[in-house]
Amino acid sequence: MGTEGLTSRRRGLGSGFGDLFRENAPRCLRTADLECHHILTTQGCGADNAQMLCKACHAATESYGRPGLPPPPFDQTTKDFALSRSGGRCECTKAHADHFLIPPPVRWRRPTA
């Protein structure tokens, strides 16, 4: 898997086998509506298995909404640590339809003469 230079985190969306083959993309730019995601659903609730993802990137993981026994929730300390480590930004580096790559355009005001 590689690492993400800004956070020293494993790259990718999550635990599904298909996520390993998903194309890499630049890191998502979203900073709102971040959720703490289990990188591997079978690896517990430690900080090393937590990844902050925006809602769109979290929903794009192979394991999101999948039937079966969900992993136990993270405690607040782990969530706070993961949020701090992510710099308050989504850690997704995998391509999918809702991956936010380009910031919205800045509209320049034309000077009036």
Image (spheres, helix red, strand yellow):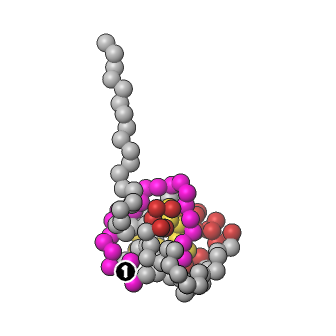
Q: Nearer the viewer, residue 59 or 90?
A: 59
Query: What is the three-letter code of the residue carrying label 1?
Result: Gly
Residue 10 visible within the image:
no
Q: Position of residue 10 (x, y in %)?
A: 44, 76
Tag 1 residue: 18
Q: Which residues are magenta?
A: 17-39
Residue drawn at x 55%, y 61% is: 34
Instruction: Tell me the quadrant of the picture where the C terminus can be found.
Output: top left
Instruction: Tell me the quadrant of the picture where the N terminus can be found.
Output: bottom left
Residue drawn at x 50%, y 61% is: 54
Q: Quick check: is 27 in the magenta stretch?
A: yes
Residue drawn at x 34%, y 20% is: 111
Q: Quick check: is 65 in the magenta stretch?
A: no
| Few, some or many residues within 10 Å of mark 1 (<14, 14–19, 20+) | few
Q: Tell me: 27 left or right of 42.
A: left
Q: Quadrant of residue 83?
A: bottom right
Q: Tell me: 98 left or right of 43.
A: left
Residue 107 visible within the image:
yes
Q: Quadrant of residue 80?
A: bottom right
Q: Position of residue 6 (x, y in %)?
A: 44, 64
Q: Nearer the viewer, residue 56 or 29?
A: 56
Does 59 sit above or below residue 113? below
Q: SS class of the residue under badge 1?
A: helix
Does 106 sit above or below residue 60? above
Q: Nearer the viewer, residue 23 or 65?
A: 65
Q: Position of residue 37 (x, y in %)?
A: 54, 72
Q: Quadrant of residue 20?
A: bottom left
Q: Tell me: 83 left or right of 113.
A: right
